[in-house]
Amino acid sequence: MSAEYRADMTGAAAALTTRQLCVTLGDRAVLRGVDLQIPAGRWTAIVGPNGAGKSTLLRALADMGGGNHRQSGEIGLLSRQLQQWPARQRAQLLSWLGQNQPVAADMAVYDVVMLGRLPHQGWLAAPDAADKAAVEQALRQTHAWDWRTRSVGNLSGGERQRVLLARALAVEAQVLLMDEPLANLDPPHQTDWMLTVRDLVGQGKTVISVLHELSFALQADDLVIMSEGLVSHHGACTDPATHTALEQVFDQRIRVRQLDGMWLALPHIPPAKPAFSAPSINPIH
Ligand SMILES: Nc1ncnc2c1ncn2[C@@H]1O[C@H](COP(=O)(O)OP(=O)(O)OP(=O)(O)O)[C@@H](O)[C@H]1O
């Protein structure tokens, strides 16, 4: 099922909802009326071709529109409209891992991750034991604890991504939004990320991730498939209708197949057309 897929069909309340969400960037209509109900306590992956509007949707859900961003429609976070939450409470509830997030290069890894605790700290208050415990746990979970005194500017792309993931985890938010969280991660750390997400969902948290790695996206509970600024399908990752919609949105250039109990997206190479062959010429006897 696509447009009508609703949070209550999964037996869960909605963590995030949108109604007729439209976003214009400059003079470009990037989201063109997105209606979504994303269930709480589940992992939803957002996929679709380049330029479909996935990051724009995630940024709108995080209320992170930039200067040339115009928006209409409604967004709900848990029990209220997004804008009605007091800023501090919203920052405790909603954590964000963006693409290419700027970080001061000379900041120590530990201090970067401690920034995730700001929504929990009093004005100019020193971090308390709970803040320190959350930071340590997040750094250990992403295997970044050993670099806690290093400057982020000296880290590789994948190491930096793990630090930013740790910052997002340190918030201990109810809802986590992650835009291309696997970027730069090597395969073992990609798998670790997935296990972390499973763990968060096991604790009742909601994870929404934009992913280009379709085989990882298929390990989510639900898939939102976007195309040209709209949701073209929203359904369970195990549903054959979701697999059909995924193959369709990528122009039949992939196939969804099961291996060892996991659904995977594999490149599909159409069979070569028979080469033109000239009619055989009967030898003259
Ligand atoms: N600041 C901007 N001003 C104008 N257009 C923009 C701006 N940022 C993005 N766009 C356009 O909006 C469309 C959607 O962009 P978005 O980044 O949301 O797509 P996406 O689905 O996340 O793509 P990708 O898979 O390539 O990351 C694209 O066509 C892009 O060119």
Image (tube, rainbow, N blue to C red):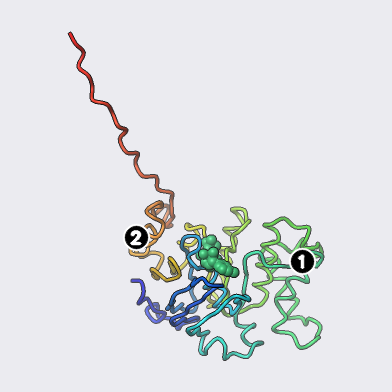
Which of marks 2 and 1 precedes in the sequence?
1
* Residue 211 is at least partly visible in this image: no
Q: How many marks?
A: 2
Q: Residue furthest left?
A: 285
For image coordinates 44% across by 55% down, the residue present is 264
Q: Which residue is mark 2?
A: 244
Local packing at callout 2 (Cα closer than 10 Å; few below 14, some 14-19, many 20+) is some
Q: Quadrant of residue 96?
A: bottom right
Query: Label 1: how many residues lie within 10 Å, few (<14), some (14-19) or many (20+)?
Result: many
On the rendered image, what quadrant is the C terminus found in?
top left
| Front-most of residues 217 and 219 | 217
Picture layout, residue 245 above or below residue 68:
above
Vertical position of residue 170 compared to residue 84: above or below: above
Residue denoted by label 1:
109
Disc 1 residue type (three-letter): Val
- The kind of residue tagged 2 is Thr
Q: Does the beta carbon at disc 1 come under 8 Å from ligand 1? A: no
User: SS at mark 2?
Assistant: helix
Q: Which of labels 1 and 2 is toward the front?
A: 2
The residue at 33%/64% (across/down) is: 241
Q: CA distance from mark 1 to mark 2?
A: 43 Å
Q: Is residue 168 visible?
A: yes
Q: Residue 177: x and y, percent?
A: 57, 73
The structure residue drawn at horizontal position 77% and vertical position 68%, both measured from the top left corner, is 104
Q: Quadrant of the N terminus?
A: bottom left
Residue pictured at 60% horizontal, 82% vertical: 93
